[in-house]
Image (tube, rainbow, N blue to C red):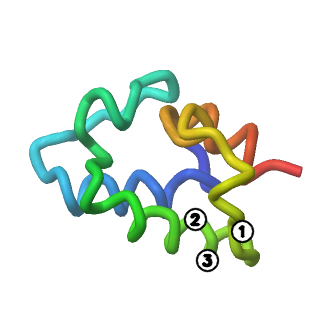
Protein backbone atom coordinates (compact mmCIF):
# COMPACT_ATOMS: atom_id res chain seq x y z
CA UNK A 1 0.00 0.00 0.00
CA UNK A 2 1.17 3.51 -0.70
CA UNK A 3 0.23 6.89 0.75
CA UNK A 4 -2.10 7.77 -2.12
CA UNK A 5 -4.34 4.75 -1.52
CA UNK A 6 -4.18 4.83 2.30
CA UNK A 7 -7.42 6.85 2.72
CA UNK A 8 -9.18 4.36 0.46
CA UNK A 9 -7.85 1.28 2.26
CA UNK A 10 -8.71 2.90 5.61
CA UNK A 11 -12.28 3.51 4.36
CA UNK A 12 -12.54 -0.07 3.09
CA UNK A 13 -11.22 -1.56 6.35
CA UNK A 14 -13.56 0.58 8.41
CA UNK A 15 -16.52 -0.92 6.55
CA UNK A 16 -15.03 -4.41 6.36
CA UNK A 17 -13.31 -4.98 9.73
CA UNK A 18 -12.47 -8.62 9.01
CA UNK A 19 -10.33 -7.65 6.01
CA UNK A 20 -6.66 -7.08 6.74
CA UNK A 21 -4.73 -7.18 3.49
CA UNK A 22 -6.10 -5.51 0.36
CA UNK A 23 -3.84 -6.37 -2.59
CA UNK A 24 -3.62 -3.90 -5.48
CA UNK A 25 -5.33 -6.36 -7.83
CA UNK A 26 -8.17 -7.52 -5.53
CA UNK A 27 -11.56 -6.89 -7.14
CA UNK A 28 -13.19 -4.62 -4.56
CA UNK A 29 -16.68 -4.99 -6.00
CA UNK A 30 -16.65 -8.73 -6.65
CA UNK A 31 -15.25 -9.35 -3.16
CA UNK A 32 -17.95 -7.07 -1.70
CA UNK A 33 -15.61 -4.55 -0.14
CA UNK A 34 -17.65 -1.95 -2.00
CA UNK A 35 -21.34 -2.75 -2.31
CA UNK A 36 -24.16 -0.94 -4.05
CA UNK A 37 -25.19 0.86 -0.87
CA UNK A 38 -21.68 2.13 -0.16
CA UNK A 39 -20.74 2.95 -3.74
CA UNK A 40 -22.00 6.54 -3.67
CA UNK A 41 -20.28 7.16 -0.36
CA UNK A 42 -17.11 5.74 -1.91
CA UNK A 43 -17.50 8.12 -4.88
CA UNK A 44 -17.76 11.06 -2.46
CA UNK A 45 -14.56 9.93 -0.73
CA UNK A 46 -12.78 9.64 -4.06
CA UNK A 47 -14.00 13.08 -5.14
CA UNK A 48 -12.65 14.54 -1.88
CA UNK A 49 -9.29 12.88 -2.51
CA UNK A 50 -8.95 14.11 -6.09
CA UNK A 51 -10.46 17.52 -5.47
CA UNK A 52 -13.06 17.42 -8.21
CA UNK A 53 -16.48 16.03 -8.96
CA UNK A 54 -16.68 12.87 -11.06
CA UNK A 55 -19.10 12.73 -13.93
CA UNK A 56 -20.45 9.23 -13.48
CA UNK A 57 -21.75 9.04 -17.03
CA UNK A 58 -18.15 9.38 -18.24
CA UNK A 59 -16.53 6.70 -16.08
CA UNK A 60 -16.57 2.92 -16.27
CA UNK A 61 -17.31 0.79 -13.20
CA UNK A 62 -14.15 -1.18 -14.02
CA UNK A 63 -12.13 1.90 -13.07
CA UNK A 64 -13.29 1.34 -9.47
CA UNK A 65 -12.59 -2.39 -9.22
CA UNK A 66 -9.05 -2.46 -7.83
CA UNK A 67 -6.68 -0.20 -5.93
CA UNK A 68 -4.38 -0.34 -8.96
CA UNK A 69 -7.14 0.85 -11.27
CA UNK A 70 -8.17 3.62 -8.86
CA UNK A 71 -4.58 4.79 -8.67
CA UNK A 72 -4.12 4.72 -12.46
CA UNK A 73 -7.41 6.43 -13.32
CA UNK A 74 -7.91 8.91 -10.51
CA UNK A 75 -5.03 9.27 -8.08
CA UNK A 76 -1.94 9.65 -10.25
CA UNK A 77 -1.16 12.45 -12.58
Q: Are marks 2 and 1 in contact (CB under 8 Å)?
A: yes
Say which mark, if any, is on residue 50: 1
> At numbered mark 2, what does the secondary structure look like: helix, strand or loop?
helix
Residue at left offset 89%, top offset 51%: 77
- How far separated are the C-alphas under marks 1 and 3? 6 Å
Q: Position of residue 10 (x, y in %)?
A: 37, 60
User: In the depicted view, which residue is nearer to us: 58 or 32?
Assistant: 58
Q: Are marks 3 and 2 in contact (CB under 8 Å)?
A: yes
When asked about the image quadrant of residue 53, the answer is bottom right
Of all residues, the one furthest to the top in this rendering is 25
- How far separated are the C-alphas under marks 2 and 1? 6 Å
Q: Are marks 1 and 3 in contact (CB under 8 Å)?
A: yes
When asked about the image quadrant of residue 27, the answer is top left
As drawn, is 69 to the left or to the right of 44?
A: right
As drawn, is 74 to the left or to the right of 47?
A: right
Residue at left offset 50%, top offset 33%: 66
**Crowding at mark 3 (Cα within 10 Å: few <14, some 14-19, many 20+):** few
Mark 2 lies on residue: 46
Residue at left offset 32%, top offset 48%: 34
> At numbered mark 1, what does the secondary structure look like: helix, strand or loop?
helix
Mark 3 lies on residue: 48
Amino acid sequence: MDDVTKPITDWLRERNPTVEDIPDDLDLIENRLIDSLGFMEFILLLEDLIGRELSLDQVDVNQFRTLRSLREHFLEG
